[in-house]
Amino acid sequence: MMNKQPCKNFGGGDGKKILYAGDTTLDSGAAYLAGILTHYGLDFDYLASDQPISSGECLTNYELYIISDYPVNNWNEKDFADVVKSVENGAGLIMLGGWESFYGLGGEYHDSLLADVLPVTMQNSDDRVQSATPYVIQPTGQHPITDGLPFDHPPIVGGFNRIAPKPDATTVMQMRPLEIDAGADGKLSFTPGDPLPLLVTGTFGTGRTAALATDVAPHWVGTFVDWGTPRINAQGPGANEVEIGSHYAEFFARLVNWVAHGRGY
């Protein structure tokens, strides 16, 4: 749903109260996460990338904030302070990657109050990596977000923001570049490079936090968006319909539920 005044209408069948901001519009990049949230019965308020957050007491009523490719100049200091207070008191915060996330091309969240809340350290200059060769996703160990997902057939991503885990954070997923060489005989060889953090989780006060270095939508998300069969047709309120992989959708639903202390996690 799309509200210029957030938190007037929220709360789905499972009681979630989510504010999702960014990814341009519901008829473009935001259609992917909007479709996943709706498919899993998670009701939300949505703000397009050109809509500023509206200050007010209602901003602190959310149980989860998802910030994805959302311009930092859409906030004022009171907005930031309200979200920080809410997370400290038990709400969740997720930042997903993009050109206007973390530092990005124009995100510059490194100087905002959210830099203290997120479980990663951001660069103070352009942190975008756009690669013509794949980065393969791997879990680093057991975690409710990733347990049971079929990483024996791992997905790949093609772009991300460079982030670094804070000392008390947990790197749940990493990504390894595949260096591809074509020999004189035409045979290809694949050499994995050093791992980089992809999904990092942490806490702030009594709230849970997460930073995902890549985007939820093409093009950075790469073939991750097609991970899993059967495929799912999903559509959020007012959004374009998307066709996505079932494991991709389950991963993002798990991420949202874990950060929001949902469904037994």
Image (tube, rainbow, N blue to C red):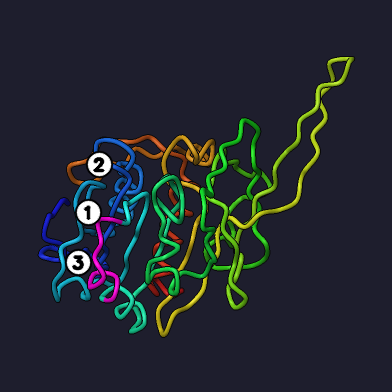
Task: Say if 30 sits above or below 171 in the image.
Answer: above
Circle 3 crowding by C-alpha within 10 Å: few under 14, some 14–19, many from 20: some
State the residue at coordinates (23%, 40%): 239
State the residue at coordinates (46%, 35%): 219
Q: Secondary structure at mark 2?
A: loop
State the residue at coordinates (52%, 36%): 222
Circle 2 crowding by C-alpha within 10 Å: few under 14, some 14–19, many from 20: many
Q: Which residue is mark 1?
A: 46
Circle 1 crowding by C-alpha within 10 Å: few under 14, some 14–19, many from 20: many
Q: Residue 187 or 220: which is nearer the viewer?
A: 220
Separation of disc 3 and disc 2 at Cα? 21 Å
Separation of disc 3 and disc 1 at Cα? 13 Å
Per the rendering, the mark at residue 25 is: 2
Q: Is residue 21 left or right of residue 256?
A: left
Earlier along the polypeptide chain: callout 3 or callout 2? 3
Where's residue 199, x and y in %? 55, 59
Q: Which residues are magenta?
A: 73-81
Per the rendering, the mark at residue 11 is: 3
Give the amino acid at mark 1.
Answer: Tyr
Residue at the top extreme?
A: 185
The quarter holding residue 188 reads top right
Give the amino acid at mark 3.
Answer: Gly
Q: Is residue 149 left or right of residue 195?
A: left
